[in-house]
Amino acid sequence: MNKPFTSKHCSPISYGTPLEKKGCSGINYGSPLNQFQEQASAKEAPSVAVRQRSTIINPNAKKLTQKQKDSLHQKAREAGKVIWSKKFKVEVDPEDGVLSRMKNPNYKK
């Protein structure tokens, strides 16, 4: 007699999530997101398709001392808005202080 669920991994009683049961033949339990990525990678993508981030790390923020950061933060609090320090080339938020990330000048929406 033919038993439809003879495989150890495909039995309906076996433990584990469907993602762990990849050994079942004819059934793809992969995530729909993974399937989309596989389809996208199958198509030829141009080599220039590098994802641009809208913000990048500001190297000048690490160079500041804590005293400089505190004084800039105080100036931003007094102004009540985000300020740009031309001297130190950093953006300062009244709530967060000196921001370690800045807008990417090469970012295109």
Image (cartoon, rainbow, N blue to C red):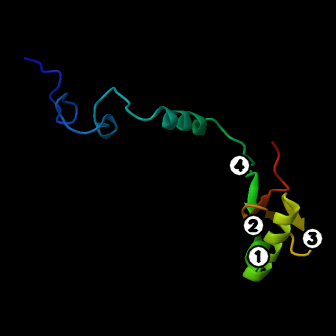
Q: CA distance from mark 4 to mark 3?
A: 29 Å
x, y (%) of residue 56?
Answer: 74, 60
Question: Closer to us: mark 3 or mark 1?
Answer: 1
Q: CA distance from mark 3 to mark 1?
A: 16 Å
Identify the amino acid type marked 4.
Arg
Please tell me whether mark 4 sits on a helix, a strand or a loop. loop
Q: Is residue 18 above or below residue 74?
A: above
Q: Residue at x 20, y 38 (%)?
A: 15
Instruction: List the residue tagged with mark 1.
Output: 70
Q: Is residue 12 above or below residue 65?
A: above
State yes or no: discs 2 and 1 in contact (Cβ < 8 Å): yes
Instruction: List the residue tagged with mark 4.
Output: 51
x, y (%) of residue 13?
Answer: 16, 30
Q: Quadrant of the N terminus?
A: top left
Task: Work out whether mark 2 precedes mark 4 in sequence or the reverse, and give the earlier one.
Answer: 4
Please tell me whether mark 2 sits on a helix, a strand or a loop. strand
Q: CA distance from mark 2 to mark 1?
A: 7 Å
Q: CA distance from mark 2 to mark 3?
A: 16 Å
